[in-house]
Amino acid sequence: MGIRQAFLLSMRSIIQNKMRSFLTMLGMIIGVAAVITLLSLVQSFQKEMMKSFDEVGTNQVIVSVSRNGNKLMQPEEMFEVAEDHPDLFQGVSPTVSTSAQVKYGTETTERTSITGVAETYFDLKSLKLVDGRFLQYTDILNSHHNCVVGSYLVSELFDGENPIGDKIKLNGMSFTVVGVLTEESDSEEGSSDDCIYIPYPVAATMNYSRDVTNYYFVATDQDTVETAKAMLETYFYDYYQDEDAYNITTLTQMLEMINTLMGTMSAMLGGIAGISLLVAGIGIMNIMLVSVTERTREIGIRKSMGARKKDIMRQFVMEAGATSTIGGVVGILLGAEATRLIGKLIDLDAAASMNAVILAFGISVAIGVVFGYLPANKAAKLNPIDALRSE
Amino acid sequence: MFGREKKRESKPFDPSMPLIHLKDVYKIYRMGDNEVRANDGISMDIYDGEFVAIVGKSGSGKSTIMNIIGALDVPTQGEYVLGGEDVSRMKGDQLASIRNRMIGFIFQQYNLLPRQNLLENVELPLLYAGVKASERRKRAMESLERVGVADKWRHKPSQLSGGQQQRVSIARALVGNPSLILADEPTGALDSRTSRDVLGFLKQLNDEGNTIILITHDNSIALQAKRIVRIHDGKIVFDGSAEAYREEISHGN
């Protein structure tokens, strides 16, 4: 008996026992749908995160230093480091974070985040202007009270009118608006458009401290990030002789962390869903064993007509395999649809991932064959005389 | 796929040799400390074209010898040569091949597959012989025509009367063109009129040159054969012509 014949036979048997076949498949359908949905959602989520990381730029190196005894590395030294290694760094800017209420005329905002930066910052971040200019070296050097504002503030405080040259008040200090940034997100409160950039020495005074502790380095490209980081580590260690006095973070590091985390999550969720596949497989084995017992006489007849062991084997393995494969395919379709719907619900650009589909399909075929083997072997080993005699 | 088919054609068979050669065949079952000799030294030769009835009461060992002749089982001891092949030492798949190539079974309970239609039932031996689909269909249809139920080929066995089902099972036995037709109580489930039909048909097949072995417990049915072998307690107690057997039983044995 050929493969094709065995296949036709198994399909007929599945169709003839519709209800039983369906219930047997149900375990498979649910298991596969769960695997597909969970893996696809995790992978879509991961993809989304990667995308936003790429937008931020993966070649940045975030440095924070602290005072160790009397030592604190000064911005001038940081600039020097960056300038001395043009092969590693595009540049550096100190970043001093603070926040304040912004006042223009009678209009005020909730607290807006303010970042004190050097003139290099705008270029490193690839920020764009719609109007005016960025902060300049002289602004920084002379601690001019000039500022560059995000688009949220323009729509909120100035009703969309050109604010260049106007004065705003940050915690009572007067600043002149010299530039307006292009909209990045959607000009909402708390978004990246809700921001103000001022010279870093000014921001430091606003924090009632002269200390500048955070720096934003940008490496020449993604491949030099780790070298740049290593170089900085040596440099800081030489200076501080204390590993706890500084902290260097790169996005690649975070990226790796997230990837590891997502991988663990995939494995965990996949494993849980995988258990349901195992249960489904046992269900198939159970039904096949019942089926073999019920069809003992049929097996006896087939054997007396000359069916060899492998003919009987093939018939029953094929039946188990077909049952679980059909269940698997239905589960894949169901899982893909569920992924799409859930993605829509949680506003995630989610689609069934190809490798999850291939994995699930492979597993469902394999489960049928593996769990069909034992019942099939039982059938194949039946003695034809006893089998013919059974009722 | 066609391996088994080819083998059949390539094996020449010497007609002067017996088709079936049984020599000192024993089948011994152990049940605890007891030893049951279901076949206790059976020897006989059956030639091509014979019509033999093996008759005996239940428990006489006639089913055991039928299973051995039908290559469903092998003797514990002794020799069984079928069509020049020593079957007595064969194992599972070899026996399956012998059954497929050499033997056509007719059972008391017909033993048709209930979910397949008549044509598919008759195709079964050819399926396992690896005959391709179109050829299978053609030969199965011819076989159904021969027993007169070809017009019902689409039906399921349960839609037919007992007599018709037995005809289908005869068609199935014939389809592979076997060397031997082995009928196990073929009329056991049929009324007397249909029984006569079936026996008449077996006689006709014998007249056409088929070798037939009929297993029965019923002397009147056994007498339809040309030669009768009576088994009692695992031994052959009579082996002769139907006439001689009639004589024997009329004397009260």
Image (spheres, coloured by chain):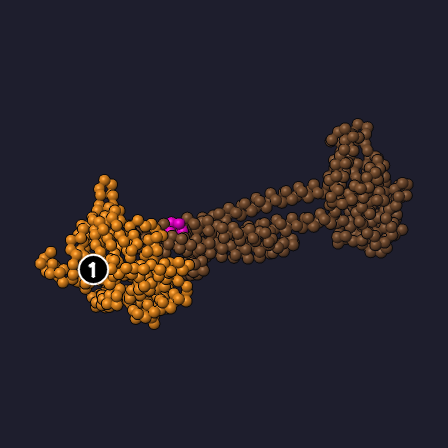
Chain colours: A brown, B orange
**Residue A190: x percent and y percent?**
75, 48
Q: Quadrant of residue A119?
A: top right
Q: How many marks?
A: 1
Task: Answer yes or no: is residue B204 visible.
Answer: yes
Which quadrant of the rendered structure holds the N terminus of chain B? bottom left
Whether A379 is among the magenta residues is yes
**Residue B188: x percent and y percent?**
23, 61
Q: Quadrant of residue A303?
A: bottom left
User: In this orientation, which residue lies closer to the viewer: B83 or A64?
Assistant: B83
Q: In the displayed structure, would residue B87 be above or below residue A115? A: below
Whether A34 is among the magenta residues is no
Q: Residue at x 38, y 52 (%)?
A: A309
**Residue A253: x percent and y percent?**
70, 41
Q: Residue at x 88, y 47 (%)?
A: A176
Residue A337 is left or right of residue B94, and the answer is right
Which quadrant of the rendered structure holds the C terminus of chain B? bottom left
Instruction: Count residues near mark 1 (Cα–Cα under 10 Å), then give few for <14, some for 14-19, many for 20+.
Output: many
Q: Which residues are magenta?
A: A376-380
> Mark 1 = which residue?
B53
Instruction: Give the residue type at disc 1.
Output: Ala
